Image: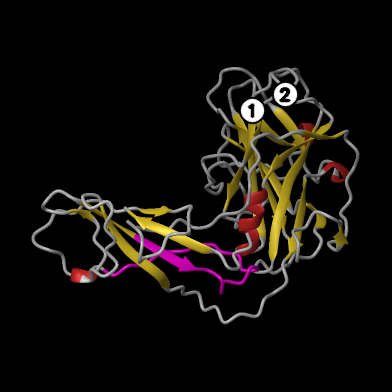
Amino acid sequence: MNMRHKIVPVLLILSLTAMMFFPISSNAVLSSDGDSVNPVSLTNPLDGIAPAGVDDPYNATILVLEEETVWDADPDLNLHGTETGGGIFVGRHGSGAYGRGWFKFDLPEVSSATIRVASARMYAYLENPPGVTDDAPIGAYYSDDDSWSETTLTWNNQPSFDGVPLDLIDNPASPDMFVALNYYSWDITSAVSTALMDDGYLSIMLRQVNESIDYTTFKYFVEEEYNSSHAAYIEVEWYTVPATSSSFDGTIPVVEDVTVIDTAPDTNYNDNGGLGGIFLGRHISGYYGRGWFKFDLSDVPSSLQITSARMYVYLENEYGDLVDAPIGAYLGHNDSWTETTLT
């Protein structure tokens, strides 16, 4: 988002929501015919799709660093070295047990302050199952805990993970949802963006979305030890934003602010400075007040990656013995108002 010369109005009817800009797709797709994948250079530019004023985007293929299965039938067992069927078991086994697949990636060492991730997908290769199974949706889940190791991971010590999948494969219907000897992919764009701002490692877990069904859905994905040419990988596309020299210190003062009152809908209260000047909530007489605030973001560098933003207001003395009620901050979509004319 280019925020140069952008004016933002905020209506208090209070915490300003953080600005997010990384999309997540709702559908994963069959992505390859099973050819092997080799890592490519991290400086392989593509032309023509970067926003104006920034460098052309780059593509990188990043092979898995560690991967392992966890298995609820033996929750304290580490399965490193077990490569049955491909090595990574996901879904419900005929015995009723469930498997999950954990994958860790070491992301490129790039500056998160000057890059934007355009897209990122994780690919896993589905091996031939030893028996015919039904299909059920499989999701990719993000974990912010990268401390696990493939040589010690178990069901009982697996890291916590987000409750909602980043992406899932849920079509077409069984038996064609998953077809053996193909790569499948999940959109993990937001997770890669987060990991780049954190420790540079990314942990993704594949699991069946519904782990309470009563039919066999076991899927065997390939781990590196089973077949390195079909190991899991991610493809990332990003572009760099040139660093901008700026005096911006992270604080943005209000440029205009004013109250509006419902019982005087045509009155402008810019000159009314009594008791602080901004009235919010219900007055004892029954009328309601709202506060409008406008901020000038022109000094915020366009290359800045915003991870959080909060609006602060000072509460002056209250008028009388009042009861509290929640107050919210609302984003306005029209910046044309002024504090001398708003009603």
Q: Residues within 10 Å of mark 2 (few under 14, many from 20)?
A: some
Gap in Å between the C-alphas at discs 1 and 2? 8 Å
Predominant secondary structure in magenta?
A: loop
Q: Magenta stretch: residue 61 in it?
A: no
Q: Amino acid at mark 1?
A: Pro
The relative height of residue 59 versus residue 73 in the rendered view (above or below) is below
Range covered by the magenta-colored residues: 292-314
Q: Which residue is mark 2?
A: 177
The relative height of residue 281 versus residue 72 in the rendered view (above or below) is below
The relative height of residue 309 versus residue 332 in the rendered view (above or below) is below
Q: Which residue is mark 1?
A: 137
Q: Horizontal placement of 27 versus 36: left or right?
A: left
Residue at the spot 53% in from the left edge and 43% down from the top edge: 156
Residue at the spot 70% in from the left edge and 18% down from the top edge: 174
Q: Residue furthest left?
A: 321
Q: Position of residue 131 (x, y in %)?
A: 76, 19
Disc on res. 95: none
Tag 1 and tag 2, C-beta contact below 8 Å = yes
Q: Quadrant of the C terminus?
A: bottom left
Disc 2 element: loop
Q: Amino acid at mark 2?
A: Met
